[in-house]
Image (tube, rainbow, N blue to C red):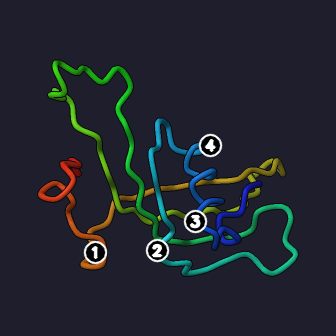
Amino acid sequence: MFNPAGLDDPAAYREHCHAFHMEALDGVRLYCLESPPQGDTVGGQYVGVHWTVNELPGLIKNKDVCFVKNRDWCFLESHAPIVLGDGRRGWVRALSSVELHCCPDLKPSLGFVR
């Protein structure tokens, strides 16, 4: 499984955003709260705080006036391996939007809708 805990390089994190977030324009990992043990190749427990901005598909433009604005969000991301009752293994990825002072609303400055 993919391990975003190893994405300290902003360019590598942007590639991650393009792979895992539909229509991502940009993104950054703000905090890594828990990462898998070093050398873990199966995707252990991970918890981090991220920010991304997404362009909505089918954006309608009329003479440089957008009717639908790009969306940004600050979110808590968690990954965990699981074992079901019948022994099958799986992997869970959960996201939840959060409000943090370090990640202010960018609508006034950049027009992003949160």
In the picture of the structure, the residue carrying the numbered disc 3 is 10
Tell me, yes or no, whether the two marked residues, 2 and 1, touch with CB atoms within 8 Å: yes
Image point 38% across, 25% down: which residue?
A: 57
Tell me, yes or no, whether the two marked residues, 2 and 3, touch with CB atoms within 8 Å: no
| Dot 4: element | helix
**Disc 1 crowd, CA 10 A, few/some/many (<14, 14-19, 20+):** few
| Dot 1: element | loop
| Dot 2: element | strand
Viewer-side residue, 49 vs 7: 7
Check the image and report above or below for 10 versus 17. below
Lateral position of residue 79 relative to residue 112, left or right: right
Q: How far apart are marks 1 and 3 (CA)?
A: 20 Å
- First along the sequence among labels 2 and 3: 3
Check the image and report above or below for 79 versus 64. below
Which residue ends up furthest to the front in the rendered image? Answer: 63
Q: In the drawing, what numbered circle is on residue 30?
A: 2
Image point 51% across, 68% down: which residue?
A: 29
In the picture of the structure, the residue carrying the numbered disc 1 is 100
- First along the sequence among labels 4 and 3: 3
- First along the sequence among labels 4 and 2: 4
Q: Looking at the figure, which quarter contains the N terminus?
A: bottom right
- First along the sequence among labels 1 and 3: 3
Lateral position of residue 35 relative to residue 98, left or right: right
Tell me, yes or no, whether the two marked residues, 4 and 1, touch with CB atoms within 8 Å: no
Check the image and report above or below for 52 versus 61. below
Amino acid on which the number 2 mark rests in the picture = Leu
**Disc 4 crowd, CA 10 A, few/some/many (<14, 14-19, 20+):** few
Amino acid on which the number 3 mark rests in the picture = Pro
